[in-house]
Image: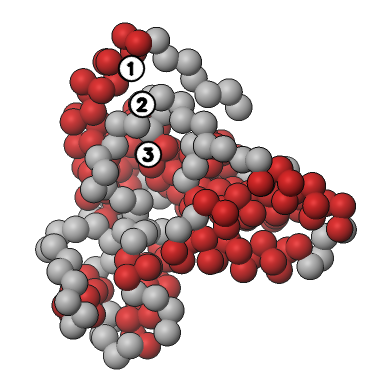
Amino acid sequence: MRALLFSAAALLAAALAAPASADLLGDGAAAYEAGDYAEAARAWRPLAEGGDRMAQFNLGLLHETGRGVAEDPAEAAAWYERAALQGVSRAQFNLALLHQTGRGAEKDGTEALYWLEVAARHGEGADGEQAADAAARLAEILPAEQVDDARARAAAFEPRLEGAPVHAAATTLILSQGQVAELQRRLAAYGYDSGPADGVPGEQTRNAVRLYLADRGVEWPAGENLSQRLLDLVPAP
């Protein structure tokens, strides 16, 4: 997939549009947490189509889970790929799983390992560790030549931005339902009552997050979205 080419005028226009685009990204995240997935999709789609990598990942997540849009694994894979090529490690991980299972993408163990290796090399914190563990397990069952090929390609990977990023630096990727459930399990293991591990980011879960972080001297603002960075702030026990 080729990166889009932007003229100087287009880059200037993107820069001028950044505040409005950042608002749309945040509006989509707020709608997602409120359970209004259709509104989240409406907010993220124009950003994703314009090249914003975080909106692309989020839209892929909606299509994979069928929240607010038609469940369409192939559409999810397409959005994940665009975000993955731009360096989003969670998109790289999710795309790898689709290739590994053949759901929405060609079933291809080598391609799955490639994206897991890329995510392991470029992902931070829990994302990188999870990808590294998955890559190691997959490498054990693939022929050596396929493993060597995937790792060689991953070593040469460089993110290719489609255009000037328009998202706000403070806006982070939302958690999927499975990741919210994992966060709830971690909080419970530390003795914080976040309710059942059902993947629903309700007020009880948010209160448990605030208490956990406050006990460790970290302030988590009220109303902030459950984001990927929480999986680093609340590590697996």
Mark 1 and 2 residues: CB-CB less than 8 Å, in contact? yes
Tell me the kind of residue under disc 2.
Ala
Residue 88 left/right relative to 115: left
Rounded to the nearest whole Å, what is the CA distance between mark 1 and mark 3? 18 Å
Mark sitting earlier along the chain (3/2): 3
Residue 16: x percent and y percent?
A: 21, 20
The reply to whether the C-beta atoms of the residues labelled 1 and 3 are less than 8 Å apart is no
Q: Which residue is located at x 87 percent, y 58 percent?
A: 143
Q: Amino acid at mark 3?
A: Ala
For marks 3 and 2, give the CA distance.
14 Å
The answer for how far apart the CA atoms under marks 1 and 2 are is 6 Å
Give 61 or 142, whichever is nearer the viewer. 142
Quarter location, residue 43: top left
Q: Mark 1 or mark 3, which has the lower sequence index?
A: 1
What residue is shown with label 1? 11
Q: Say the numbered circle drawn on residue 164.
A: 2
Give above or below for 89 relative to 213.
above
Q: Nearer the viewer, mark 3 or mark 2?
A: 2
As drawn, the label of residue 177 is none
Classify mark 2: helix, strand or loop. Answer: loop
Report x, y in % for residue 144.
86, 58
Looking at the image, residue 142 lies above or below residue 23: below
Give the residue displayed 32% in from the left and 81% down from the top.
187
Name the residue type under label 1. Leu
Q: Name the quadrant of the C terminus.
A: bottom left
Q: Is residue 120 left or right of residue 100?
A: left
For label 3, the residue is: 55
Say whether residue 216 is left or right of residue 188: left
| 77 lies above or below 45 | below
